[in-house]
Amino acid sequence: MALIRKSRNADAPAVLAIINAAAEAYRDVIPPDRWHEPYMPATELEREIAAGIDFWVAEEDGQLLGVMGTQDKGEVALVRHAYVTPGSQRTGVGGGLLRHVQGLTTKPFLIGTWADASWAIAFYQRNGFIIVPAAQKNSLLRQYWSIPARQVETSVVLADDRWMSGQQCGTKSG
């Protein structure tokens, strides 16, 4: 089983390598105008960290196998940039990272991903997340993410049971 720990500055090259290798799955799936090479350049990773994203890594025998970011947005927490090396996918690394970050706070979690990334959506659904209705999705993406309108159009938001329970009770979370 992989050790999950907070990412360190020295992990940045390996984190980028994981993100960019795993993101190859998006090539020819997401809209061509949203794909870029590399998928995440080093400057973007630096901006994301500066914006308050904390990255967690799964490590085994000195090798990083996966990465998952979290971002505190006040009343909710976001899962950001969740990727597992292609050779370690479907081995429990992603689920372990997700359970770890969910255990870090009692806040509801939201996840944004590409609408055509069926494998990512299925992963989150297997782990208890529910797709937010389209009417709420756009509002949530504008409220909690800083992404272009084109990305809002081509994305979905998934929520955990904490968020869904809050919606049923009438509390404000979006």
Image (cartoon, grey):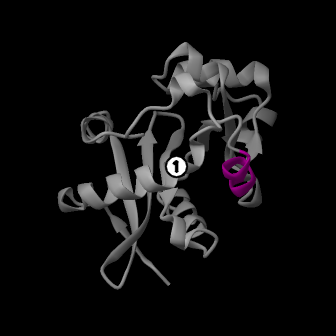
Q: Nearer the viewer, residue 16 or 139?
A: 16
Q: Residue at x 66, y 50 (%)?
A: 120
Q: How many marks?
A: 1
- Residue 14 counted in the magenta span: no
Q: Residue at x 60, y 66 (%)?
A: 95
Q: Can you give x and y, in whole percent of width and height, for residue 24 in the image?
A: 52, 49
- In this image, 160 relative to 65: left or right? right
Q: Is residue 54 above or below residue 148?
A: below
Question: Residue at the left extreme?
Answer: 10
Q: Is residue 56 above or below residue 154?
A: below
Q: What secondary structure is marked by label 1?
A: helix
Density class for disc 1 (Cα within 10 Å; few <14, some 14-19, many ≥20) is: some
| Among the 4 quarters of the image, the one containing residue 150 | top right
* Quarter of the C terminus within the rendering: top right
Q: Residue at x 26, y 42 (%)?
A: 42
Q: Residue at x 67, y 35 (%)?
A: 157
The overriding secondary structure of the stretch rendered in magenta is helix
Q: Can you give x and y, in whole percent of width and height, for residue 144 in the image?
A: 51, 26
Q: Is residue 148 above or below residue 3?
A: above
Q: Which residues are magenta?
A: 118-124
Q: Nearer the viewer, residue 155 or 96?
A: 155
- In this image, 98 relative to 165: left or right? left
Residue denoted by label 1: 24
Q: Nearer the viewer, residue 28 or 148?
A: 28
What kind of residue is marked 1?
Answer: Glu
Q: Is residue 122 above or below residue 149?
A: below
| Among the 4 quarters of the image, the one containing residue 65 | bottom left
Q: Can you give x and y, in whole percent of width and height, for residue 2 in the image?
A: 45, 79
Q: Can you give x and y, in whole percent of width and height, for residue 159 in the image?
A: 69, 42
